[in-house]
Image: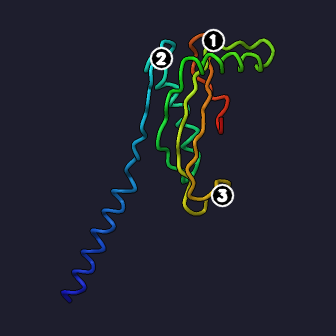
Amino acid sequence: MKKKVIIILCLSVAIVLALAWCGKEKEVAIDYGTSELFSQADMDDAIKEILKKFNTFKGCELYSLSYTSDERCEEELEYRNKHASEGTTYDACIVFDSSFHSPVSNAGAWEPNTLYTWSWYLVRTDNSNWKLVGYGYG
C-alpha cells in the first residue's frame, strides 16, 4: 500500500511538472541593433508580424531575431520597390535575421532536428501596418 502511494505521488509530481513546462513560452532573444530609420516600437510591430507567421511552423522553436542594419533595409526597400506591382511604392522595408530549430521528429517539410537561419522582409506605406513580403534563406 505504501509503495502504491509513493508511485502515485511521484506520477502526480511528474504530471504537474510536465504541464508547467509545456505551458511556458520559450524566451526569444531580440537584438534591436542600432537604427536611425526605425524606433523600437516600429521594430516591435514588425516582430509581431514575424511571430504570427512563425507560430504556424508547428514544432519549430525560435531562438533569436536580430535587426540587420539600416543599410540592408534601404537596399531591400529599393529591391522591393523595383519588383512591386505597378502603382505600388513602399516607404519602408525592415529586415530581421533569425535562428530557429526544426522539430526533432515528425518534421514534415523541415529537415528534422536542424538549426535554420532565415531572413524576414516586411514593408509598409505611409506608416501603415507592416506586411510580411518574404522570408527564408538570404
Q: In this view, does 7 lie above or below 113?
A: below
Side (left or right) of 79 relative to 24: right
Labels 2 & 1 near each other (Cβ < 8 A): no
Residue 8 falls in which quadrant of the image?
bottom left
Task: Tell me residue 23's x, y (percent).
Answer: 38, 52
Side (left or right) of 50 relative to 138: left
Side (left or right) of 30 relative to 106: left
Mark 3 or 1 closer to N-term? Answer: 1
Residue at image position (57%, 54%) is 114
Labels 3 & 2 near each other (Cβ < 8 A): no
Q: Is residue 30 above or below residue 103?
A: above
Q: Can you identify the residue that label 2 sits on?
A: 35
Which secondary structure lies at badge 1?
loop
The amino acid marked with disc number 3 is: Gly
Side (left or right) of 61 relative to 11: right
Q: In this view, does 4 lie above or below 25?
A: below
Q: How far apart are marks 3 and 2 (CA)?
A: 37 Å
Residue at image position (62%, 16%) is 74
Mark 3 or 2 closer to N-term? Answer: 2
Q: Nearer the viewer, mark 2 or mark 1?
A: 2
Task: Tell me residue 4's x, y (percent).
Answer: 25, 85
Q: Which of the two residues, 104 or 129, is positioned nearer the viewer here?
A: 104
Q: Can you identify the residue that label 3 sits on?
A: 108
Residue 107 falls in which quadrant of the image?
bottom right
Image quarter (top left, top right, bottom left or bottom right) of the C terminus: top right
Q: Which of the two residues, 71 or 31, is positioned nearer the viewer here?
A: 71
Image quarter (top left, top right, bottom left or bottom right) of the N terminus: bottom left
Mark 2 or 1 closer to N-term? Answer: 2
